Image (cartoon, helix red, strand yellow):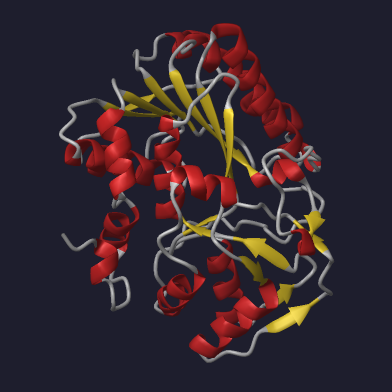
Amino acid sequence: MMSEYDQLGDPIRDVRQLEDLLSEPTDGVVATMGRLEGDILILGVGGKIGPTLARMARRASDAAGVKRRIIGVDKLEIQGKDELEAAGIETLRCDLLKADQVASLPDAENIVYMAAMKFGTTGQTALTWAINTGVPVMVAQRYGGRKIVTFSTGNVYGLTPVEKGGSLETDELNPVGEYAQSTVGREQIFEHYSRALNTPMAIIRLNYANEMRYGVLVDMAQNVWNEQPIDLSMGHVNVTWQGDAIAMTLRAFDHVAVPPAVFNVVGSDTLRVRDVCEKLGSIMGRKPHFVGEESPDALLSNGSHGWECLGCPRVDVDWMLPLIADWVKRGGENLGKPTHFESRDGKF
């Protein structure tokens, strides 16, 4: 059967087509969902990636012939709630900072933990630590012994020389800023409860997911199109297609362990910001405006271990750039959540 990716030749028409494309499961995800026993609970489903992950889990489970509940949980009213429920995904509201509400969450054998605070951490240090470290304590206790796949970030490594090719999962962590430091705290809390309660886990260090409505490449495309200056001080980046990041995340259920297995989830290339923007400029008919000088180090991760265990990316930057450029030029929907990838001081 041809996939959405095989059929895609023209620009992505609208959000509905985009969501179908992003949530298309790979054969590997279908196989994982076929082996996995029990329901899936997604905590923090209302974020940028959550709705698509829920859809892919639903589609892959159905394709595998497995009947299970896919339950999405978030504090706020979930955007696209009606569409998710129409797709067979249950939705619940829960303030994860309140222990009684966490305790009342439904039982599930498999947890995807996505709740986090990144943007707005500057000036809200206490809330950042409460969300990024306090909530994991309650969740890890509530679901001790179940399978947990939790999101993290490549920011935990800190800056690494570009020539090194990116940080490995075994490298010493060197977090810069409250977000990265509190995310290391989250990892450590989950590891503690993995060992203490014999809970099999996987940690996903993501760097950076992209689609048409947000991501590093969208930030670059908007700057090029609007003729805004592009800061070169963070001169190199990792990006990955959101659909590929989700596929790798769901496949991590095959690799949960005590203590947690750790995977970098990144695209297949280390990208030079100047080169990407010049390609976008050529596609969009705009001349990029650069400021600053490239630094010899950047926030970069080596994805080879993740690709070996969780599958290789389906698409690369050359596939994404023309589609993102077209979307931005047409004024397509934007989530209004810039990545601030150029930040070198860890302030978001």
Q: Is residue 239 left or right of residue 92?
A: right
- Residue drawn at 58 percent across, 63 percent down: 216
- Residue drawn at 63 percent across, 20 percent down: 191
Q: Is residue 156 left or right of residue 39?
A: right
Residue 309 vertical placement versus 14 (above, below): above
Q: Is residue 35 left or right of residue 86?
A: right
Q: Identify the image quadrant of residue 130.
A: top right
**Residue 57 position within the rendered picture, expressed as x and y whole percent measured from the top left:** 30, 38
**Residue 95 position within the rendered picture, expressed as x and y whole percent measured from the top left:** 48, 22
**Residue 112 position within the rendered picture, expressed as x and y whole percent measured from the top left:** 44, 30
Residue 272 vertical placement versus 146 (above, below): below
Q: How many marks?
A: 0
- Residue drawn at 66 percent across, 52 percent down: 301
**Can residue 265 be seen here?**
no
Could you say which is closer to the camera, residue 174 or residue 264? 264
**Can residue 177 be seen here?**
yes
**Residue 132 position within the rendered picture, expressed as x and y whole percent measured from the top left:** 64, 28
Residue 319 vertical placement versus 190 (above, below): below
In the rendered image, which quarter contains the N terminus? bottom left
